[in-house]
Amino acid sequence: MDISTEMVKELRTRTGAGVLDSKKALQDTAGNMERAATLLREKGLARAAKKADREAKEGLIEAYTHAGGRVAVMVEVNCETDFVARTPDFKALAHDLALQVAATDPRYVQAADVPAEVLEAERNAYRALMADEKKPAHVMDKIIEGKLKKFYEEKCLLSQPFIKDPNLTVADLIKQAIAKLGENIQVRRFVRYKLGE
């Protein structure tokens, strides 16, 4: 199949991939735009996983004020070089992360940051709620793990569904940015202020 420049341009717009990668993906999928986009996403995520161990000490702090000055957020987002930190894509990512924190009020960056005593208190609260139910211990444990997953989605920034596209988690959004920008990207920390709290 002949791959037109319009097809390559459309795929690049959808995925942020380079010209050659877009053309190759379209050739490999016989011009199927959806399959080509999926292929590029998979390749990008594989590249992102390889970059995860690289040190990220540059970046920026994004500040966002919402609701007439009633909510303010600061998010530190790190990358490997100051060059990438100045790109519009990186700045847009940092802004989206600040919006996410303002809208969802997470408490932790990732699940690993949740203190053990907080997790144990959550488990105990779930057990107390289900004390009247006569379920086997292994079933109760599965239910509790499911509830903890929901807890992480509510309280951990990287586990949350992205507010602009609930089909993506915030971690997936960052992986896409890593694939596009070619550098490791990390959310180091954030703070959220609400008037009167």
Image (tube, rainbow, N blue to C red):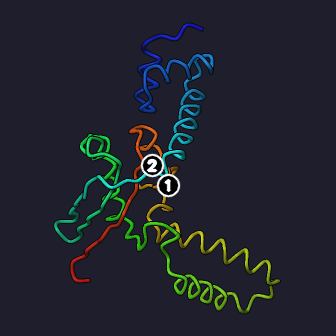
- Left or right: where 161 falls relative to 60: right
Callout 2: 10 Å neighbours few (<14), some, many (20+)?
Answer: some
Q: Secondary structure at mark 2?
A: helix
| Mark sitting on residue 169 | 1
Q: Residue furthest top?
A: 2
**Circles 1, 2 touching at the beta carbon (< 8 Å):** yes
Question: Residue visible at 20% across and 71% down?
Answer: 70
Disc 1 crowd, CA 10 A, few/some/many (<14, 14-19, 20+): some
How far apart are the alpha carbons under marks 1 and 2? 6 Å
Q: Amino acid at mark 1?
A: Thr
* Image quarter in which the C terminus is found: bottom left
Q: Which residue is mark 2?
A: 173
For residue 188, what is the image quadrant?
A: bottom left
Q: Residue at x 22, y 60 (%)?
A: 63
Residue 23's x, y, as percent?
A: 50, 18
Q: Residue at x 42, y 48 (%)?
A: 184
Give the amino acid at mark 2: Leu
Residue for point 56% across, 88% down: 121
**Of helix, strand and loop, which one carries label 1?**
strand
Q: Nearer the viewer, residue 155 or 49?
A: 49
* 128 left or right of 43 in image: right
